[in-house]
Amino acid sequence: MSVEELHPPGVNQPRMLLLRMPVRSFSIDEVALANADEVATFAIEKRRDEHLSGRWLLGQAVEAWGLDIAGLSVHRTDHRAPYLRHIPGLWRNTPLPSISIGHASGWAFVAIIEHGWRIGIDAESANRGLQENAFNLMCKGEELLALQNAPSHAIELWVAKEAVQKALGLGMHLNPRDIGIPIGVPHATITIENLNLQLVNWVNDSMQMSLAWGQFSLSIRTPEDALLDATRAAMQEGEWGVGCKTTRGNC
């Protein structure tokens, strides 16, 4: 299997791993981090192949990170951002890295970053163009004027905004017009709602790539969190004792 590690220019910290591979057909039995119910929703074979290739590649990244994928599963937030979780019932609380997955032009991409950080990766063919009548759907104000004066940067700007949306875990729930990015700048710091993200844009093998990352976490609660909270509350209310209630006659 042809898996390639990507190295964004000028990025040294924090610990992260970026991989890509050509999209290919997988059976679901080959992809440990795939969910059969989710895969069943894909009516188009191309979309199914992209999804399974991304999940298979994620498994490679997770194992290279030093984790056992047998004890992990992939879930989604309310905004459909993917994240890793220990399989319920194992009662493990080891901090897990954040992840991002993308697909473009026959390639699958995965980015993984150490716990406490968020990451977003996106890519498109560097030769892909965007119609100028679509510019105002992703830009406004001075940024729109700048793009109209430099339309060759359109795909770079679009990919960068998608990487930021992914890093924030919001996807298109964050309007791209509300993300201001310097046009034609390979490295930038982006501030969205008091959160700072680093952004790098580069071209790799005719693919326009963007990577965004920042030091913050999504608030994600698991079923184990809810059970532990309920147990703690019951103990604080005196409903739990050692073996039984301490009231006479309850043992």
Image (cartoon, grey):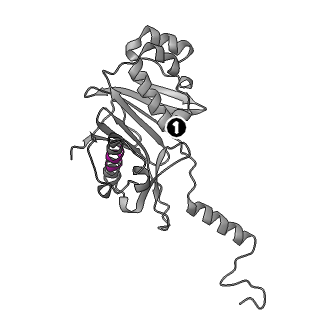
Say if residue 68 shows up in the picture.
Answer: no
In the rendered view of the protein, which quadrant contains the C terminus? bottom right
Residue 52 inside the magenta-drawn segment: yes
Magenta range: 51-56
Check the image and name the residue furthest to the front. 43
Q: Is 187 on the left-hand or right-hand side of 225?
A: left
Residue to which mark 1 is pinned = 168
Instruction: Report the front residue among 246 and 89.
Output: 89
Residue 1, image x and y in percent? 21, 47
Instruction: Tell me what residue is drawn at x 55 percent, y 58 percent.
Output: 222
Say if residue 202 shows up in the picture.
Answer: yes
Residue type for callout 1: Leu
Residue 45, image x and y in percent? 32, 43
Residue 244, image x and y in percent? 69, 84
Residue 152, image x and y in percent? 37, 14
Q: Is residue 47 above or below residue 189?
A: below
Which image quarter: residue 5?
top left
Which image quarter: residue 239?
bottom right
Q: Is residue 101 above or below residue 105?
A: below
Check the image and name the residue furthest to the left. 1
Q: Main secondary structure of the magenta part?
A: helix
Q: Is residue 94 above or below residue 120?
A: below
